[in-house]
Image (cartoon, rainbow, N blue to C red):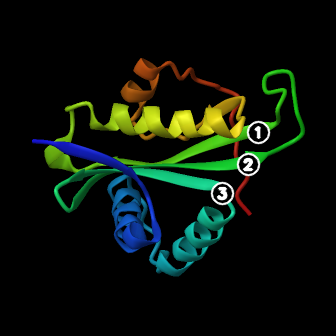
Amino acid sequence: MEIEYKRLTDNELDTFIKMRINQLREEGAKEDIDLYPALKDYYTRHMADGTFVAWLALDGDKIIGTSGMSFVEKPPYFGCPSGKIGLLSSMFTDKDYRHKGIASELLKRVVDEARNYGCGTVQITASDMGVKLYTAFGFTHNNNFMQYKL
């Protein structure tokens, strides 16, 4: 098995979006809305302006893993003097390819993208499945994370 890694382009975007929706469903999302148009709009705009990048793992022509990174900026603070933050998303590996180091390689590539962008930190809301991967990579828990839904 020879896995190839490449950056997401418009050519793979349709498949990437479908995989993202499947991932959200696998993680327990129950909402009955069509998220495809909103995801298409988001990825198209943010890929164009450089504030979203993604890496793919391919086995032949089949996309078997994904990773994504959105770049946001907030006022600088002591923990992140640049104010630039990478928001990790779309970490997903096809069930048949898990536990082979693919997710680790995809994670390394998008974290490198965040570093090159000038981010001082990378954040993720981790699924139960992902916690082990992120902890092994060096992520730590921030128990102060809170959310207010509008």
Q: CA distance from mark 1 to mark 2?
A: 6 Å
Q: Amino acid at mark 1?
A: Lys
Q: Which mark is residue 84?
A: 1
Question: Quick check: 80 above or below 50?
Answer: above
Identify which residue is drawn at 53% across, 71% down: 39
Identify which residue is drawn at 36% across, 57% down: 23
| Crowd tier of the residue under label 2, counting other residues whose Cα lies within 10 Å: few below 14, some 14–19, many 20 or above | few
Q: Earlier in the sequence, mark 3 or mark 2?
A: 3
Give the quadrant of residue 15: bottom left
Q: Amino acid at mark 2?
A: Val
Q: Which mark is residue 50?
A: 3
Q: Nearer the viewer, mark 3 or mark 2?
A: 3
Q: Which of 147/106 is in front?
A: 106
Q: Amino acid at mark 3?
A: Gly
Q: Which mark is residue 72?
A: 2
Identify which residue is drawn at 87% across, 28% down: 77
